[in-house]
Amino acid sequence: MYNYGADPSLSAVQRIKVVGVGDGGCNTVDHMYREWSNGPELVAVNTDAQSLQSREVPTKIQIGSNVARGLGAGGDPKVGRLAVEEDRDLCRATFEGVDIAFFVVGLGGGTGTGALPEMIDAAHRAGALTLVFATLPFGFEGQERMQHARKGLELTRSMADSVVLVPNERLYELVEEGASIADAFRHTNRIVSQAIMSLWMMVTRQGLINLDYSDLRKVVRLSGGTCVFGVGFGVGSRRTQAAVESILSSPLLIHGQLLADSAGLLVSIVGGPDLRLQEVDSIMSAISAKAGANTHIAMGAIIDERWHDRVLISVMASEEWQGGADAGEPKRRDTALVKKDGATVLDSGVAAEQTSMAFDTFGRGRFKDVEPTMIDGEDLDIPTFVRRGIPIEK
């Protein structure tokens, strides 16, 4: 077990919670609880009473006891959504006084996919910054689960300040041949755990190079869209080289290609008191050399005496950047979830001004290697106005 904990005497610690939603999210926060000797508050949220009872995390919240009867959502996101609605006040109380809410979820299931958007809405109403770490299903989990995951990801991206996506299919390259499915999921838990902990340490510890809560808030709000995360770890005399090589070869970052394609990078470096400034410079030089010429890079370097002879590098790469390095924070819509024709949708509360938009092509982005969603001969992953040739004018 690593002691990642921040020393409260060194800095004013923001109120941070890590919330696992559904079975997948609860598995991850349980892993965090076993691995961390201290850290941010961990919360497990689920509709399945038996599964929730088996968790080691002290704070557990069962939602939807009437609609789900403690038996889980049965893979139906509608049940997950109704479960949060049933316990809306309890969910909102969970985020009172919270500055940053990390959500962990395995998209595709009923509770995680359906309950997550409502939980994010509750956190926003409490004034919290929201970062979601989401995994997509393996291919063998079935097309229906992948379709649920895609729809859930679309709504989640509309709600959260930032979404860090971990496609499980890329984990094949990270585990040894013949590894069990349990090993693969444990590896996912480890990556998400390290990523969240590095961000938590970044904003709660005085560092060699500080990146505080306001910096993180700005970077996350400006980054927009979906992000991906890579983690590199090194020990001993070649710790820096090993950690950098691990980052640049990470399948989650498509072997460094996403660093070159990304519009914004958030880099966190954690090391012991023996970490030299030249090593930090070497790490950032290697990452900057791989990044694009106009990529916005924000970084922090944390020194912790318990990390002697070790270094951890975490990189969050964003597809978009909604302003330059000196840009102010974008205005966020006052969004809320409303019901329309029996479905949960977003309501901005204001009328949007239509401007001309050029949509000449449509890319599948992260889902380029996944089977399309075909209904009656139409690919539903392509926007309706593109499929039907509808022009959008100013």
Image (spheres, rainbow, N blue to C red):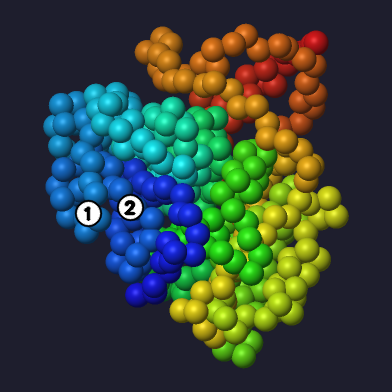
Q: Position of residue 131 (x, y in %)?
A: 50, 44
Between 204 and 107, which is closer to the camera in this rendering?
204
Q: Position of residue 269 (x, y in %)?
A: 61, 68
In the rendered view, tell whether residue 362 sits above or below residue 39: above
Q: Is residue 182 left or right of residue 176?
A: left
Query: Which is nearer the N-term, disc 1 or disc 2?
Result: 2
- Mark 2 Cα within 10 Å, few/some/many (few <14, many 20+)? many
Residue denoted by label 1: 58
Image quadrant of residue 119? top left
Q: Position of residue 239 (x, y in %)?
A: 61, 83
User: Which residue occupies 42% across, 31% down?
Assistant: 126
Check disc 2 and give the amino acid type: Leu
Image quadrant of residue 313? bottom right
Residue denoted by label 2: 42
Quadrant where the N terminus is found in the figure: bottom left
The mark found on residue 172 in the picture is: none
Q: Position of residue 307 (x, y in %)?
A: 50, 79
The residue furthest front is: 9
Quadrant where the C terminus is found in the figure: top right
In the rendered view, tell whether residue 63 sits above or below residue 249: above
Gap in angstroms between the C-alphas marked 1 and 2 = 8 Å
- Helix, strand or loop status at disc 2: strand
Between 192 and 216, which is closer to the camera in this rendering?
216
